[in-house]
Image (spheres, rainbow, N blue to C red):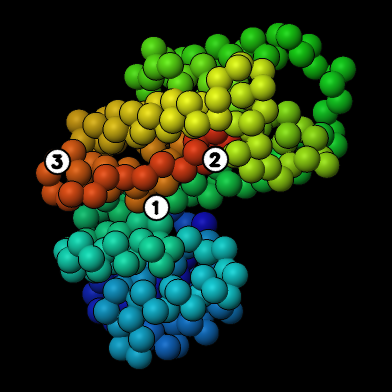
Amino acid sequence: MRFVIIEDDVSVRKIVGNIIDKYKLGTIVAECGDGLKAEAIITEYAPDVALIDLLLPGQDGVELIKKLKESGLETSFIMISESTSQPMITKAYQTGIDFYIHKPINVLEITSVIRKVEESRRLREVMSLISQTTARYVSPSSLPAEQDDNAKRNRINRIFSELGIIGEAGAKNIHQLVQLVDERLQNEQDQAYQLHELYQELSLSTELDVKTIEQRVRRTITKALQNVANMGIDDYHNDKFEMYSGALFDFKEIRQEMAAIQGKSSYHGKINIKKFLEGLLFLATM
């Protein structure tokens, strides 16, 4: 990946740069210590990842990222700061950052975060590729459909088991929704969909009302969020935690849920049902 480092402390820039080089995480294409100059630099280089200090001369990191996001850049943003203010951290996430790293710089944390960002970007690219090309290049007769469906079903059941939700009433509904999403992604003319459309279609085939389906799905995915957050508390570098926290959830919400479980915050993480369903489908087709 291509990196830009925006930090007014030269020593911090050097530390971050050395970590990226040493662990072969990517290439640093530019760096600077001014918030106003940074806007032009990031726009010009359009890096994969920008590591940005919160407090910068010219304009702060939050304002800088807000402007860059509005311009349509697909850069991933990691914020670095000494601030532990929860309102400030929340504001940074609302602006659109992927991760928030506290100073002083911790080698394990920064390498782990950068690898999670890389995995998240790869997931988005693969999901985009699937949605754009599946219908075009895979005809219904080119695969043994029943065998393929059984393989997906088995993988999803294994994932449910690892997430601790296989016994939940909503697990079956989630499985059915994933099948509907899969059908839409394979239909080039019907790739845009709304959740309420899926709920209505599922309601017709199951005789459950839409509200019941939605409540079951939300409860089940919320439980999965809690279980994944607990995995991270037990072992931040657990393989399953690293995979599911990025593929099925927004990682900032996992961090928020971890803070709530540990009693550090009164706010719990939020779920994104579409991301969960599409992430589950991606994992089932790996």
- Is residue 145 visible in this depiction of the protein? yes
Residue drawn at (45%, 74%), measured in percent from left and top? 66
Residue at x 76%, y 13% (from the top left corner): 145
Q: Which mark is residue 274?
A: 2
Q: Position of residue 254 (x, y in %)?
A: 32, 43
Callout 3 crowding tier (Cα within 10 Å): few <14, some 14–19, many ≥20: few
The three-letter code of the residue at mark 3 reads Gln
Q: Position of residue 41 (x, y in %)?
A: 51, 81
140 versus 239 height, above or below:
above
Q: CA distance from mark 1 to mark 2?
A: 24 Å
Question: If the image is split into quadrants, where does the C terminus sit?
Answer: top right
Identify the mark nearer the N-term, 2 or 3.
3
**Residue placed under numbered mark 1 in the picture:** 114
Disc 2/disc 3 C-alpha distance (Å):
27 Å
Indicate left or right for 186 with 69 as reference: right
Q: Amino acid at mark 2?
A: Lys
Kind of element beneath mark 2 = helix
Three-letter amino acid code of the residue under disc 1: Ile
Among the two numbered marks 1 and 2 on one chain, the one whose residue lies closer to the N terminus: 1
Q: Residue at x 58, y 75 (%)?
A: 71
> Could you say where residue 114 lies in the image, as x and y percent from the top left?
39, 52
* 275 vs 236, nearest the viewer: 275
Lower position in the chain sequence, tag 3 or tag 1: 1
Above or below residue 40? Residue 221 is above
Residue pointed to by mark 3: 262
Residue 136 percent across, percent down from the top left? 85, 37
